[in-house]
Image (tube, coloured by chain):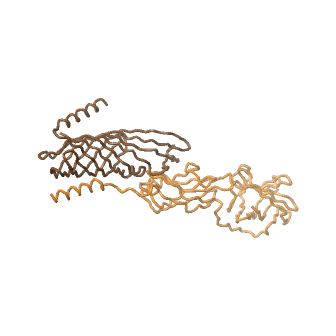
Amino acid sequence: MKNNIILSVFCLLFVTQSCKKALKEVEDYYPTVETTKIEYLPDNKIKVTGKIISNGYSDLTDLGFCYDITQDAKMHKNQLSVNEFTKEKTNFDGETFTGIYENFNSATANVYFRTWAVNQNGYSYGNSIALNSLVSPSVTVPCNITENTYNFGQGVRTVSSVILSLQFDKTIIYASGDFGSFEISFKNPLSTGIYKTESFSGGNFCRIQFTNFNSFTINDGFNVYVNEESDFYSIVCCNATYNVSSSSTGNFNFNIKVVK
Amino acid sequence: MKKTFNLVLILISLFSIEAKSQYFASIGNFRPNNDLRFINKPAASFEIGYLSKFEEDTPFRFGVGGQYIRMKPRSELFRQVGFINGNPYELNVKYNSNTFAFLNFYSDYAFVNRDYLNCFAGIGIGGGIFMSEFVSNSIYVNADVIDSNYMFNLKIRAGIEYTINDYITLQASGCYYGFKFFGSSRYSAHDFAIGLLLNFE
């Protein structure tokens, strides 16, 4: 009799406890990720790094990044899926993952990046990081030109007026002094980096054009150094050339400070 | 469908030829496991049915019961995903309810078989329907859906019964459920139930 009662208690325990324990909160079923950093890379690339805090209740099935002009970017907006990573590793708590946006081009002043992750129960997002929160590493300028001066073969001149114009897809700086004026166009977004001059107006890089005489354009392939600070840009061109005519060239350099 | 109905009638007829029988009604605390638990709260389960009675020389009994369970969701919204060309997008789902309705055919064995006390273990097999009412919301789809799926179920149970008098027996039992949906997933659950059995000749 006693053995039978013990057996019946055992049976009760078996049928009610032989299962995987449910999690207390619904949120615990979802994966947890965070966006750790975003970085500028050369050639208009943005590198985004995320970290997996937890897989949640089930294995991750997909993982990636997104960005938008609002802080709550949805995963389908500019989606970058890190599929290779997901396929190779099915359990990667605590690991970091990265993605690179190539030819990054934002028509707006700021966008927000964030990570997302999907497991068999659902999805979740990491925190958002604003692009304009980045402080890019400064570039070293290999020449020493006095700030707010320019010289296109007529001697050093002082820049008396600088205007920054943010347009739909480009940033234009209008500079003028006591002897001539010029404009510098950059494809957005303008940030710290070394840009190459390009005379073709549809180019991706930097175009410098004199606007007062015969609209000479700086020849292709010269470096323009941009250092972005919190409230201004410092833009320097050490030594570029332009064609006055088919047989004659001129040299040009400048160092201007543009308030944002 | 007609075949299933005929089978049920035959089984009920077989049970009815037993000399002593019981009608029963039980109420349980149904607790889904694993992925079923992710969406659903524990819920009350209701069952009514018919059982033959354990006899002194026959520790086996058979029976049939119909069970109904209506579960409420654990969260206002579930963050799920849809896919377009393999790329995921947000698909937020709001469940109104998830309902089981199924029939169990029981076979129990009493390993303690006294006049007033029985301890038993048994299995129940059967099938039924699972119905889910939900609203899914995404940039691509907004749909109000009632989805239903047929399923098989297996119950493994154990319990104790105490007979108060010639007419009334009280029952307490624990049960493990395995569900297999047609063409898709397996789920499990367990419950604790108490029941009232009405004895008659």
Which residue is at a point 77% across and 55% down the rendered structure image? A165
Chain B shade: brown
In the image, residue A149 above or below residue A104: below
Location of the C terminus of chain A by quadrant is bottom right
Q: Tell me residue B136's x, y (percent).
A: 50, 43
Q: Quadrant of residue A247?
A: bottom right
Q: Nearer the viewer, residue B43 or B35?
A: B43
State the residue lying farthest toward the top. Answer: B2
| Colour representing chain A | orange
Question: Relative to the observer, which residue lies in front, B148 or A258?
Answer: B148
- Seen at 50% across and 59% down, the residue is A33
Q: Where on the picture, by quarter, is residue A257?
A: bottom right
- Where does the N terminus of chain A fall, quadrant-wise? bottom left
Left-right relation of B149 to A200: left
> Can residue A218 be seen?
no
* Count of numbered circles on the image: 0
The answer to whether residue B134 shows anywhere in this view is yes
* B143 sits left or right of A11 in the view: right
Q: Residue furthest right?
A: A178
Q: Nearer the viewer, residue A86 or B128?
A: B128
Instruction: Give A111 or A153, whichever is nearer the viewer.
Output: A111
Estimate the x, y position of residue A52 in percent, counting from the top left: 48, 60
Query: Relative to A234, is B112 on the left or the right?
Result: left
Image location (x, y in percent) of residue A142: 71, 68
Q: Residue furthest left?
A: B57
> Residue A76 placed where, x, y %?
56, 48
